[in-house]
Amino acid sequence: MAHVRHLIDVRTGDEFDQPVPYGLVYPVCTADGSAPPSQRGRTWEHLVACDRELRPAS
């Protein structure tokens, strides 16, 4: 399976970007199109622990 950069949280609609496979995941924008409160990269484990359910954007 190829690496997918553009991800969406299915619960909130927030958009994320993972530029490098197995690297940090960065918030891009919230569901309403505004800037995220923090643009700091997070590990996949941290996002899952925060109840994020990320899926590839279609």
Image: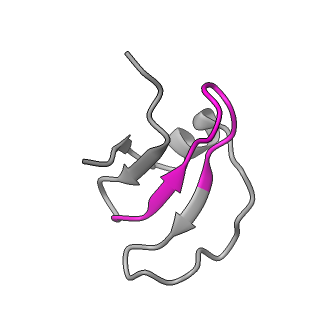
Coordinates of residue 5 in the picture (x, y in percent): 49, 41
Q: Residue furthest right?
A: 40
Residue at 68% over, 32% down: 23
Residue at 67% over, 38% down: 43
Comparing 11 with 17, the one in front is 17
Residue 2 is one of the magenta-drawn residues: no
Coordinates of residue 10 in the picture (x, y in percent): 29, 53
Does residue 37 lie above or below 26 as drawn?
Answer: below
Residue at 31% over, 58% down: 11
Does residue 15 lie above or below 43 as drawn?
Answer: below
Q: Is residue 3 left or right of residue 10?
A: right
Magenta segment boundaries in residue numbering: 13-26
Residue 25 is one of the magenta-drawn residues: yes
Comparing 3 with 40, the one in front is 3
Which secondary structure dominates the residues rendered in magenta?
loop
Does residue 44 lie above or below 8 as drawn?
Answer: above
Q: Residue furthest left?
A: 58
Coordinates of residue 12 in the picture (x, y in percent): 35, 65
Quarter of image, res 9: bottom left
Comparing 38 with 50, the one in front is 38
Quarter of image, res 24: top right
Q: Is residue 33 left or right of residue 57?
A: right
Position of the N terminus by quadrant: top left
Residue at 60% over, 26% down: 21
Coordinates of residue 57 in the picture (x, y in percent): 32, 48
